[in-house]
Structure formats: structure tokens, C-alpha cells
Amino acid sequence: MATAASREHALPPALDSFVGRRRELSTLRALLSSTRLLTLTGAGGVGKTRLALEFARGLSSRYARLDLVELGSLRDGATLTQSVAAALGVGERAGQTGVDLLVRAIGDASRLLLLDNCEHLAEPCARLVLTLLSRCPRLRILATSREALRVPGETVFRVGELSLPPADAGDDVTALLRSDAVRLFVERAARRSPGFTLDPGNGRLIAEICRRLDGLTLAVELAAGHIATLAPGDILAGLDDQSSQLDLLAGGSRTGPRRHSGLATAVDWSHQLLDPAEQAVFRRLAVLVGGFDLAAARSVCAGGGIGPREVLPVLCALEEKSLIVRLPGDAAPTRFRQLGVIRAYAMERLRASGELGPTLRSALTWLHEVAERVGGDVFADQASSPLTTERDNLASVPVHATGQGEAARVRLTLELARVHYQQEQPSAAGALLSGLLREPGGRALGGEVAALAARVAAQQGDPHRALFLGERAVSLERQRHVPTGLANALDARAAAWLCHGAFAGAVTDLRACLDILAPLGSPEDVAWCTQHLAWALLQAGGEREADELMADCLPVLREQAPWPRAAAALHTAGAVRLVLGQLESAEALFTEVLRIAPGRSFHALYPVEGLALVAAESGDMQRALRLCEASAQARRRLDTEPEAPWRRRIEQAAARARSLLPTAAREAAVVGARKLRGDRLIAYALRTGSGEQVRRGADTVRSGDERWWLTAREFMVVELVAKGLTNRQIADELRLSAHTVATHLDRVRDKLGLRSRTQIALWFGRRHVTRWAGPPS
């Protein structure tokens, strides 16, 4: 405990460097200027104390005195007041209580009191803080705790994990060192092993170590501490082994708080503060490695004296105590997860309790029920499923719940393969499906397994296997006499014919598929099959009929289908209009896809390539080559390939552009393409920014010749504001939440210095931005 009888600023000196957290420090300064009680909360080991101390040191000139009170060693609240008094150098006086002494000593002086590690004394700390703030008008208190104190007027700041490197950083040292977690690892590792540096040889490994540790400060420091003994690859292997993970993350400072001697000790400190119901839910959640929502938590954690209705308040308590974290985003339902090292501890507690088997069975049953609820889609392989968000749970739970619910395991394996297929991971999907095709249990699913396997083979560019599996799927479904199953099998075989280059066969199968679907009364299914037929006809030279079919099905898919299907249909319509020579219409359709598809997904690459073809047909060869090159680079990063006919068109356009461009223009296009990633690429494709104009990072684009910078998404919001749309209408248009739209508008106002929607609309009108004609009906 600090003693501060004669010092103005009783904060211990920093013995190691402070890494990152610059944004947090700026936010904390703003918050403390408007509140008298600021509480830093977060998981054990996230770095609350270190951040609070660094922040407080920066405030030394603002306060007559700064004092630190470390509460970790106190067993209960009985001596809290005396401990605070001792830290402040306040001696006892006859006839005065401890609180009165503190109030008298602080008086109306401008002081900052830092109370560190309050969670195990939350109630007595709350009472003391309330009294001091009420009676000492110029006192401000900065507290750290794994949960809020819940005092009136308290401002709570959640300390998050350190920033992690982006997935596409590769071994780019500069990109990796933008991550606070990587910088901390390198700094601490260099202290343990002088001369250690980050380089292309170890960059990927260190980045993955930091990701595996979720950027948890203490975990990163503990892992880096092994660098003198273990190579980065060995450290990563140790983290992969759950049985040794917590042992590896031990061996912290001998002189620091005991709770920071290792991750297990840090988590155990929090675990001991939970009541029995909270402990039970905490350990049972460990089987949900991919995160969970309330419905999942209720299904998996209820039982053993815990009713389903009790799970929600327990989840809230665990989140308040920083033992689970809420995933970012406004989408419902809200999802949570346990950080990796916390989940490893929870899994140890689950095994020790003897509940591992029953909990895994509950998780298996829950996943199977979800699969049954979302089943029934004719084209389930190509439908957005809630199980997509459960991919990691699908991969983990059935494997560990061995010997339980064989039918459920088989069905969930198929669902996992579907998720891999939809995310363009054909190798992972194919491996799962090959096993199912050999298993007796797979036969109960009829032609579903073979149909998906045919699509996967087509995705992998294996036409012979795709056609063999497509034939098998159709044969199995003809034996079952289930119309929807046969329609799906015919659609899958059509995909195989397309992969084979046998376009007439694809057209025949898709016409037969439509004949089956027409009487079943599902407009969306009919429309989806129709757009497949239009695509096949386009390859077969029937673009006129294809255009007529798209005029019928596109309005239905725009109105009723989820965005991936609508995006695919818009792309087909754009490709048809391109072949028909209707370049403005094609450009409008490809642009519409870009406005609904996430910029960093493979769905956005098709319209980018479509716009490259439009540019080539329009004679703008430099733009065409730049878009082709940028899209090719993005596909390599995402490890995704387009269908062969489309790929050939892109390659031909790029080759034509190279042959027609002068050497300098060709080289400029290729160099410019390297700068187009993510939002930059989308902005360039939409003509809201250009590769040459981009100067300030991956997600900013310059608008015209103005000095202000907007992201591509912000520019879309501005455009819709100029059209008179409300926030709710903009949210619906861009498939965002109204809250996200409001946040974008706040940033726009800050960047442009404009306050009203009218001013924003007038600003947009002066920019002479190209307005796209609406796509044809």
C-alpha cells in the first residue's frame, strides 16, 4: 500500500514502458472533465491498473495531490476506511471516525484519488466513495474494478483488449506494428531476450499468438516472457493445447500483485467472487467456443437448480464482472463470448465439476434444434442461415460430444459443411462431405449431401466429380419422391453442367427445376431458380431470353430475398445487360450490388469486376486494368475464385487493356491497384474517390478537391441524406441499424464542420458527384 504523508503525488514510478492505448487516454481525459467518479472496468489482466496509472500521471499538473490506494490485499471492507486514510497519510484523532478524518483531510482541495482493484469490496467502496464525493466538493475519484461500483453519477469506461493486427497483414512488419498487442509482445520479448525484433520470418506467428490471446494485456506479456526459452512457434503450439495453455501463461512478476502472477490466478480471483449459480453458468458456457446469445445460454446452462429464466440475470452479472464480453455490433440477438484464456479456465472448472458430458449433450441438442428450425429451405446450400454465426460451435460441439445423438451429429456435420461452402472454403466442406458420403447415417439425408458435394466440387473446379455427384443426388431424390429435394438436386447438377461447360445440360435441368417449383407456391424459390436459368442461358448465348427472365425475377429477389441472393441476381442482370451492350444499365446494376454487399467480402468482387468490364467496353482501359488488378489481388487474399466463364471474361478484358495501354499508363494502373483495398477499392469503383487521391489510410477517401475526408460508407449515407431519406430509411437502404447510421452522420458532421442535414445535402449537391441511374425493373 502506498504511503503519501509528505508527497504531493504518491504514484509509483513506471518500471516498464507503456505501450499503446493512446485513444483510451484521450477518451479518459474527456470523461474525467465531466464526471467526478470514473471507473475503469474490464477482465482480469486486461490492463486496467496500468492504464489508470498512466492516465493519472498525465494529470499531475491539474491537481494539488494524487493518491493511490491499492485494495487487492484487503480481505474485507472492515478496514477499508483505515487503509485509505493510511494511504493518504491521515492519522487518527480522538472523537473523529475514519470517514470524518478523511473528509477533514481532503476538505475542498483539488485532489484525485485512485482506488485500485475494488471488485471484491464493491459495496463498501461504493458507500465510501459516495460519502467522500458528497462531502468533498473538489475531489475526483478514479477507480479500477472488474465491475462497476454503481454509485450515482458514476461514469464507467470499459477497458477493452489491445488492438490486434488485421487478418490480411501477413508478414508486413509495418502493418503488424500498428497493433498494440504486437508492439507490447515485441517490447516485452526484447527485454527478456535483448536483440529480439519483429521480422517477416516471425511476424505471422507473433500476430497469431496475439490473436489467440485476444489481445489480453497480461496474457501477451506472459507469453512474451517465454521468448528467451521458446521459439514463437513453440509458444503458439502451447496455446493450441488447452491442457497446457494456462500453465504456459504463468510465471508473472514475483513482486507484483499475486492476482497477476498468471492468467489462472487472475481468473480465479474473479471466479471466487461469484455465487454458485454464476459459477455454474460461467463454467458451462465454456463449451460454446464460438460465442453465444441468450437462447443458446439458456439451452446449454439451465438445469441443476438453475431455471431458464435465471440465466439472463446471471449473464448480465458475468458481463458486469468482465467474465464474458459482448461482441460489437447492433444486430439482434446480442452475442457474447468468453475470452480464450478465460474459457480455458472455465473448461477446467467444468471438467472438475463432472458436468462436461451433460453440458456437451445440451449444446448438441440445442444446435440440432436450431438446424431443425431453419430447415426446409429448398436451396438450403445457398441460403443465409443463423447457423453461420455458430460455425465454431458446429465444429467443436459434435466432435467432443462423442457417442451422443448420432443423427444429430450427422445433420450438424452437413450444416457445418454448408457454412464452409457459403464462406467459400471448399476444402473444409469437401472433407466433411466425403466422410458423410461414406457413412450409413448420411443416407438418411437423401440427396442433400451429394447435392452439396456437387456444388463444392464445382466451386473447386472439378467438373467430373461435380457431375458424378450431381447425378447421384438426382438419383437419390428420384427414389425419395420429395419434390423440393429433387428441385435442389437438379439445381446442383445444373451447377455441375456449368462447371463442365455443358450449358445446354444446365438449361435443361433448370427448366425442369422450375417446373417442379412453380406449383409449390414459393415466389422466392421460383425467382432464385429463374435467375440461375438466366445465368445458364447467358453462357449458352440466350441473352435475350435471359434478360426477359431477369425482368421477372429481379423485383421479387430485391423485395423478398436476403442480400446475398439479391446481390447475385443483380450481378446476373448486370452481366446480361453488359452482353446486350447496355453499358449504363449494366453499370447501374453492378453499382447497386456494391451498395448492399459488405466491402471486404467476396460478394463485392463480382460487381467490381463487372465495372471493370463496363470500363473496358467504354474504352477506359486504365480504369479497367486497375479494377481487374485490384480485384485479382483481393481474390488472392481471400483465396477465392470466380466461375470459369466469368473469370475468362475478366482475364480477356485485362489482357486487352494491357495490350492497348502505353507502358507508363499500364504501369500506373498496376501500381494504383496495389493501393486499392477494402473501402478504397469500393470508393474507387463507385467513383466516390480514386487511388491517386487516397492519402490517409485504408478507410478514407477524398471527395473532389475538398479538404475533407469521408469513408465510402459515410459518403453513401451523405448521398441518401441529400435524397431526403430519414435515418431509418437510410438504415433499411444500406442494411444497417439506425444507431450505426446516426454514428456515421456524427462523424460526417465532425469532418465537414456541418451541423444540419440541410447543410450536408447542400454540400453534397456542390460536389457534382456522379449520380447513378436506377437499375431497370
Image (cartoon, rainbow, N blue to C red):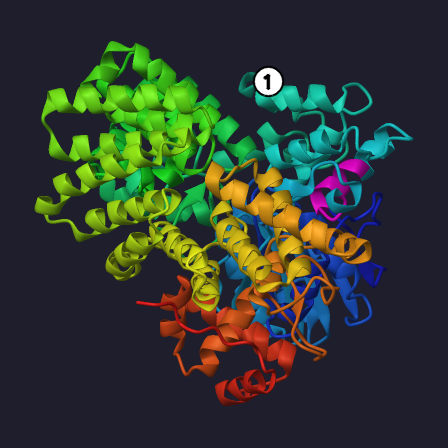
Residue 154: percent from the left, percent from the top? 53, 65
Q: 435 left or right of 763? A: left
Please indicate whether residue 127 sits to the left or right of residue 88 in the image.
Answer: left
Quadrant of the rendered structure where residue 94 is? bottom right
Identify the residue shown where x is 36% and y is 31%. 502
Q: Is residue 306 visible?
A: no
Q: Position of residue 378 (x, y in %)?
A: 21, 39
| Element carrying mark 1 | helix
Question: Front-most of 203 and 170?
Answer: 170
Residue segment shown in magenta: 177-186
Residue 219: x and y, percent? 66, 34
Q: Is residue 15 above or below residue 450?
A: below
Residue 60 figure quarter? bottom right
Evaluate whether residue 592 shows in this view: yes
Considering only vertical position in the picture, is 14 above or below 588? above
Amino acid, disc 1:
Ser
Residue, far right: 195
Q: Name the residue rendered at 16%, 35% in the picture.
A: 484
> In front: 158, or 468?
468
Location of the C terminus by quadrant is bottom left
- Residue closer to the observer: 490 or 241: 490
* Residue behind mark 1: 244
Secondary structure mostly seen in the magenta stretch: helix
Left or right, 435 with respect to 228, comes to left
Instruction: Report the residue at 71% width, 59% height from top.
Output: 697
Question: Vertical placement of 277 versus 106: above or below?
Answer: above
The residue that appears at 39% across and 55% down in the rendered structure is: 576
Picture coordinates of residue 324, whole percent (x, y): 47, 42
Task: From this view, report whether residue 247 is shown above or below residue 580.
Answer: above
